[in-house]
Amino acid sequence: MLVLAICCMSLLIVSLDNTVLNVALPSMAKDFDATLSGMQWTIDAYTLVLAALLMLAGSTADRIGRRKVFQTGLVVFTAASVACSLAPNLESLVAFRMVQAVGGSMLNPVAMSIITNTFTDPRERARAIGVWGGVVGISMAAGPLVGGLLVDSVGWRSIFWINLPVGLAALLLTIRYVPESRAPKARRPDPVGQFLIIVLLGSLTYAIIEAPSAGWTSARTLGFAALAVAALIGILLYEPRRPEPLIDLRFFRSAPFSGATVIAICGFAALGGFLFLSTLYLQDVRGLDALHAGLWMLPMAAMTLLCAPLSGRLVGSRGPRLPLLVAGVMMTASGVLFAAFDAETSDVSLFIGYVLFGIGFGFVNAPITNTAVSGMPRAQAGVAAAVASTSRQIGQTLGVAVIGAVLASGVAGSSYARAFVGASRTCWWILAGCGLAVLVLGALTSGRWARETARRTAERLEEPDDAAISRAAAGS
């Protein structure tokens, strides 16, 4: 239980960091005279690096030792948090956030491996993972309120100070109590695949965020977009040739796995866009301070906290289909309420919109990992879960990038507050589309046909390599 508490401490600071930061964005922007794209980069620099390095950190920990990598992650994350609080300008803050993400990538996936190796009994392990998932809900609920209190009372730099005592306590407890462990057979490094992933995510995000200022058809925007396409083609051509690829593309033959990946991207893109849009609206348009903006976002966070464990129980008893359908309906309804009925113009409808989104997001998280590993061989379940976690970070990165780019294009050359509501309508339609994608994919990838594709994929993955090659040769 102490090991579980230590792992949950690391998850808390990593998860809390994102939700707290959103409330502090307007204050940061004033101090640094930052543009909208600058605010986007303070969030996306973190989630982008996290998405790119999660799988590398997990495989490295399996190879050289999970406790060793976990300790390193705590040191890097805590030190980078202090550096963020001392950042003299926006460029430094973004750079320190990237270093922070390097440490963060060594925490969550490695902590999950430590938990699964510590809790060997299946029931105890399931209970431990349930507690782990509950910490995410706590961070979601506490983040806006804690961030608002700190920003209004001490200043935005204080949001990074809270990582220092928690990080140091977790580090000392890890050294004393967490046992070292390694995988019996760790996956080999894939530096080329890792490089292609970084190029794909980095160039795509840069093209989206900088397009409003550089021009959507400018050479810079098109060049980075072309680089992203080239990196994607490189992944599709190179990874299948490796015996132990960073991403085994055969996984995507499973409809539940492919569905979970896209659902994670859509669901967390909606979350990233929702938090970014709401923070700017509440503080820059309504003129609320950080604390009152945090209080307004509390209904969404509270519903997420309440619905997440209910979703987990439904997944355990009835499978992922019902939670995914509920999530899709609620997230779509929230987006449509804002996009078509101007929910932000009334306190009551604004509250309802936030509650609906909180219910939707609360139900979407639990079935993602379950659906991703559904039917996978046990030896591949960890990798499948890691891809789902990476997809969450990719979704949040793209959500902030796309929503910010649409906003920036809509308010360019106009009075910011006056143009914001009109520009945000398109953003809300995008978020409604993300919710609709969750609904449709949840229905399509959780039925009998989808389970059959997962079974066939599992059989292929369990085949010895020489048998698979012989079968492929016979088929051709």
Image (tube, helix red, strand yellow):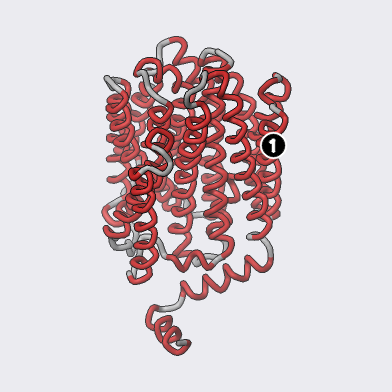
Q: Which residue is depicted at the point 64% across and 26% down? A: 299
Q: Is residue 107 visible?
A: no
Which of the 4 image quadrants contains residue 157? top left
Residue 183 image position (x, y, % from top left): 34, 59
Residue 146 image position (x, y, % from top left): 49, 20
Between 399 and 108, the residue placed more toward the observer is 399
Residue 378 image position (x, y, % from top left): 48, 64
Which of the 4 image quadrants contains residue 464? bottom left
Between 45 and 227, the residue placed more toward the observer is 227
Residue sitting at the far top: 153
In the picture, the quarter occupied by the C terminus is bottom left
- Is 404 left or right of 87, judged from the image as shown? right
Q: Which residue is depicted at the point 35% across and 29% down? A: 169
Q: Amino acid at mark 1?
A: Val
- Is 198 left or right of 269, judged from the image as shown? left
Of helix, strand and loop, which one carries label 1? Answer: helix
- Is 259 left or right of 248, judged from the image as shown? right
Image: 237 above or below 475: above
Q: Is residue 365 visible?
A: yes
Image: 337 above or below 240: above
Instruction: Give the residue pinned by disc 1.
Output: 336
Label 1 Cα neighbours within 10 Å, binned few <14 / some 14-19 / many ≥20 = many
Image: 455 above or below 123: below
Residue 56 image position (x, y, % from top left): 33, 52
Q: Which residue is depicted at the point 33% across and 46% down? A: 179
